Image (spheres, helix red, strand yellow):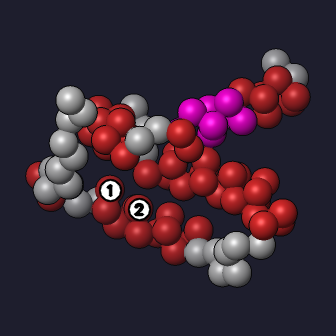
Amino acid sequence: MSGVETARQADEADDTLIRMDACTVVDHLRKGELTPHDLLDALERRVAAVDPKVNALPTLCFERAHAHAERLLALPAACLRACRCRSRI
């Protein structure tokens, strides 16, 4: 697979993640289909693509966000179940 194809697939995957609603993201996280790092990576790439045009984020803290995600992932699963998301009707 070429670098262009890989980049295109990453862009499509990022777009899918960015467009997901919160309940869907939580469902994927609970099933282990996504990690917080997957979401942060997609967000970081999106910010890199968009922010130069809009200049909306003067301070970026992705390293801190990844460190916080690591701490959350180290918690027992029962602690993470406290995050409730209502199913869509």
Quadrant placement of the N terminus: top right
Question: Which class describes the residues within 10 Å of circle 1: few (<14), some (14-19), or many (20+)?
Answer: some
| Residue 82: percent from left, percent from top | 14, 56
Placement of 68 over or under 12, stated as above or below: below
Q: Are the residues tagged 2 and 1 within 8 Å (C-beta)?
A: yes
Image-quadrant location for residue 72: bottom left
Residue 35 seen in render: yes
Q: Main secondary structure of the magenta part?
A: helix
Residue range (magenta): 10-17
Quarter residue 11 falls in: top right
Instruction: Please provide percent x and percent y for residue 69.
Output: 41, 62
Q: Which mark is residue 1?
A: none
What kind of residue is marked 2?
Ala
User: Who is closer to the viewer here, 67 or 88?
Assistant: 88
> Under tag 2, what secondary structure?
helix
Residue where numbered disc 2 is placed? 69
Where is residue 34? Give x, y as percent: 43, 38
| Residue 78 inside the magenta-drawn segment | no
What's the CA distance linking mark 2 and mark 1?
A: 6 Å
* Nearer to us in this view, 54 or 12: 54
Left-right relation of 18 to 33: right
Task: Report the side of 85 relative to 16 (left or right).
Answer: left
Mark 1, secondary structure of its residue:
helix
Query: What amino acid type should be assigned to the residue bearing mark 1?
Result: Leu
Q: Which residue is mark 1?
A: 73
- Furthest toward the front, the residue is 89
Query: How many C-alpha atoms fall within 10 Å of the one at disc 2: few (<14), some, or many (≥20)?
Result: some
Residue lying furthest top in this view?
A: 1
Which residue is at a point 41% across and 41% down the rendered structure image? 21
- The residue under the point 47% across, 38% down is 20
